[in-house]
């Protein structure tokens, strides 16, 4: 830890662990990328009286200034890149809310500059980038948390609690994924479908959430092999965009992907995700174990919601039984607030990242494995360093 970061931590010395805490001075927070999701970050940050948003950056000239005006962020400094912002500001933390292809460079540069990072999901586009981000977090000792807000939802936490209780026995098969019948996200332009900005499509937008839901529940075992498939039949069809048929030419990512993944511990994971399909849902999430199986009704897990009460199928005194798990109420302040607050609490206390990079590297390894396997048309082995 360098002197200036030691000074920052000293100011927070007497705060308690594991609780939402207040800093003795305002935390200085910057936002890199002032597009759509930056709105959600500012909305929640403005509710926190121990936080001061001091600077913004966006590559598009005038965009950060317009954003500052919209949110009444008087006196914030606006910059034209993450580098300019980080070279000129003394910060405690940044939200990296850029499109996928710049998550890695912005996060790595911020941590190298001594700043803690909350990076939006997906962690990155490639596994190589995700490893570089994780290794920078380890090397610099900075907190790197990835923006999976559904983790904060009580029903999502219950999935993990059920698995960890042992009631399912040894887990051997998982099916997850889902998607939309017609939902290629282009309401704010083309940053989700252009390969230069998105890098990956449905997997990076929503698939990573399905993977996080089940992998977090089972403790993120490493993937060993991946067989992947991806397609772009809807994305490349001009009829998909009645008002913008030119988007079909820009579309450079996948609108559907599927993968069959062997995980450490003798578990297989069957995954599929769609931005568009001629189907209502490709199925519920199921976690099968030797003592019981869990069914999570087809879910928009990217919104932190499950599609109805979960059920556990098991045997009791020789009879086949089904146990319904009562639905839990959402967190009062919302998952998005909690994802940012838990990150900032970790900054204040010197605690652990709420959604740590050593886990999400594995999420990214699966996505990367599907891309690579689909390219080669065959199963691939996943090589991961010590995380
Ligand atoms: N957690 C969620 O619920 C959620 C929801 C939507 C989007 N996201 C994620 O948030 C990210 C951003 O999505 P969006 O819809 O806001 O995208 P967007 O395209 O609307 O905004 C991204 C902005 O980042 C800027 N940018 C890119 N690289 C930059 C750099 N190096 N320095 C400064 N600015 C830079 C772009 O100019 C753009 O204005 C994506 O990765 C997406 O997956 C998360």
Image (cartoon, grey):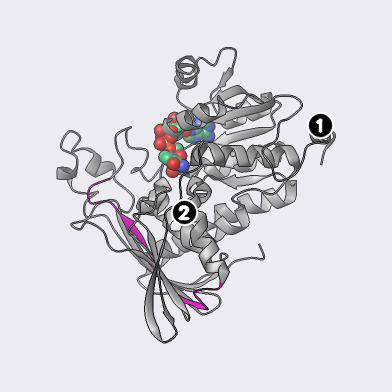
Q: Quadrant of the C terminus?
A: bottom right
Mark 2 = which residue? 155
Tell me if mark 2 has few (under 14), some (14-19) or many (20+) residues whose alpha carbon lies within 10 angstroms of its own: many
Label 1 sits on a secondary structure element that is helix
Could you tell me if residue 58 is visible in this image? no
Image location of residue 141, percent across then percent down: 74, 47
Which label belongs to residue 275?
none
Specify the farthest residue to the front. Answer: 317
Q: Secondary structure at mark 2?
A: helix
Which residue is at 49% across, 38% downward? Answer: 334
| Residue bearing mark 1 | 4
Task: Out of 62 and 20, give the one closest to the viewer.
Answer: 20
Residue 36: x percent and y percent?
A: 41, 31
Q: Residue at x 67, y 65 (%)?
A: 386
Image coordinates for residue 249, horizontal then vertical, percent? 24, 43
Residue 348 location, x and y as percent? 72, 37
Front residue of 243/221: it is 221
Q: Is residue 58 above or below residue 328?
A: above
Q: What span is colored magenta in the figure?
A: 166-183
Q: Is residue 177 magenta?
A: yes
The nearer-to-camera label among 1 and 2 is 2
Does residue 30 appear in this view? Answer: yes
Q: On the rendered structure, is 281 left or right of 206?
A: left
Q: Earlier in the sequence, mark 1 or mark 2?
A: 1
- Left or right for 203, reference 255: right
Give above or below for 241 relative to 162. above
Does residue 170 belong to the magenta stretch? yes
The image quadrant in which ligand 1 is located: top left
């Amino acid at each position: 830890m360098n002197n200036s970061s030691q000074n920052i931590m000293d100011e927070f010395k007497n705060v308690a662990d594991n609780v939402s805490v207040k800093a003795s001075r305002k935390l200085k927070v910057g936002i890199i990328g002032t597009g759509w999701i930056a709105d959600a970050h500012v909305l929640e940050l403005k509710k926190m009286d121990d936080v001061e948003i001091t600077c913004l950056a966006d590559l598009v000239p005038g965009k950060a200034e317009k954003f500052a005006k919209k949110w009444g962020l008087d006196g914030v400094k606006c910059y034209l890149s993450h580098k300019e912002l980080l070279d000129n500001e003394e910060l405690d933390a940044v939200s990296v809310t850029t499109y996928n292809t710049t998550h890695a460079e912005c996060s790595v540069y911020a941590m190298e500059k001594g700043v803690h990072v909350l990076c939006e999901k997906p962690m990155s586009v490639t596994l190589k980038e995700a490893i570089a981000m994780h290794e920078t977090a380890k090397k610099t000792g900075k907190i790197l948390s990835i923006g999976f807000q559904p983790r904060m939802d009580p029903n999502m936490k219950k999935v993990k609690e059920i698995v960890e209780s042992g009631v399912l026995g040894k887990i051997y098969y998982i099916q997850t994924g889902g998607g939309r019948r017609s939902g290629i996200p282009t309401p704010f332009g083309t940053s989700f479908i252009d390969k230069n900005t998105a890098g990956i499509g449905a997997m990076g937008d929503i698939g990573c959430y399905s993977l996080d839901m089940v992998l977090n529940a089972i403790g993120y075992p490493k993937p060993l092999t991946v067989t992947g498939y991806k397609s772009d039949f809807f994305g490349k069809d001009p009829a998909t965009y009645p008002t913008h048929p030119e988007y079909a030419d820009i579309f450079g990512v996948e609108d559907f992907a599927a993968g069959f993944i062997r995980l450490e511990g003798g578990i297989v994971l069957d995954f599929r995700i769609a931005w568009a399909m001629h189907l209502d849902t490709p199925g519920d999430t199921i976690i099968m174990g030797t003592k019981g199986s869990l069914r999570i009704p087809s879910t928009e897990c990217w919104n932190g919601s499950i599609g109805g009460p979960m059920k556990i199928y098991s045997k009791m005194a020789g009879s086949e039984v089904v146990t319904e798990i009562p639905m839990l109420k959402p967190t009062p302040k919302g998952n998005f607030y909690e994802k940012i607050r838990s990150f900032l609490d970790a900054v204040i206390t010197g605690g652990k990242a709420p959604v740590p990079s050593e886990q999400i590297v594995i999420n990214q390894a699966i996505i990367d494995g599907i891309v690579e396997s689909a390219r080669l048309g065959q199963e691939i082995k996943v090589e991961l360093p010590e995380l």
